[in-house]
Amino acid sequence: MGQYCQVCGARTESRCVDGRTRDVCRDCGEISYAQWKVSAGVRVVNDGKILLVKRSHEPYQGKWHMPAGYVEIDEEPAQAAQREAREETGLTVRVEKLVDCYLDTDDPRGNVIILLYDASVVDGEVTPSDETEAVEFFSPDEVANLQLAGESAEKELNDWLNMVGKQ
Ligand SMILES: [Zn+2]
């Protein structure tokens, strides 16, 4: 595996611990537990259209999803959702309430829990960033043919379509 212990820096090895394979430090015995990453995103609807961004990098290059990104260690998820929205779309949003928690287990960067919030635009102009090739609002009919960035993007959009009675 070529992993190093986060406590002492020595090499780790795969061992069976409590019935699961885990990385264990050869020197100090520290066990590394594979855990979920946490991401936060926004569901922004304007005039009945949903805000989506198109990724400019792999993974999911050229695929669409609601603005979202990893929660920094010194942020609350709702703050992270607002920050990611601004970075990825140029729009300042007000985060309203938690929609749901979505799971992504097909992302090569690791399994992610996405906390998705309803949010509304308060300021700014749509401006794609380095991460986003395009930023657009789509009607329920228009999203049908879009290529989406994995299972969580599909679930998020399906839930919205169900809510607005389009599926
Ligand atoms: Zn160690």
Image (tube, rainbow, N blue to C red):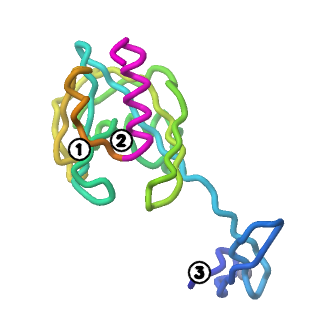
Displayed-image quarter of ligand 1: bottom right
Q: Is residue 129 magenta?
A: no
Q: Which of marks 2 and 1 is nearer the N terminus?
A: 1
Q: Position of residue 65 (x, y in %)?
A: 32, 39
Residue 3 numbered tag: 3
Q: Is mark 1 on a helix, strand or loop?
A: strand
Q: Distance of mark 1 from mark 3, alpha carbons?
A: 33 Å
Q: What residue type is labelled 1?
A: Lys
Left or right side of 107 for 74: right
Left or right side of 80 for 148: left
Q: Position of residue 20 (x, y in %)?
A: 75, 67
Dominant secondary-structure state across the stretch colored magenta: helix
115 over 31 or under it: above or below: above
* Residue pointed to by mark 1: 54
Count residues near mark 2 (Cα–Cα under 10 Å), then give few for <14, some for 14-19, many for 20+: many
124 over 165 or under it: above or below: below
* Residue pointed to by mark 2: 84
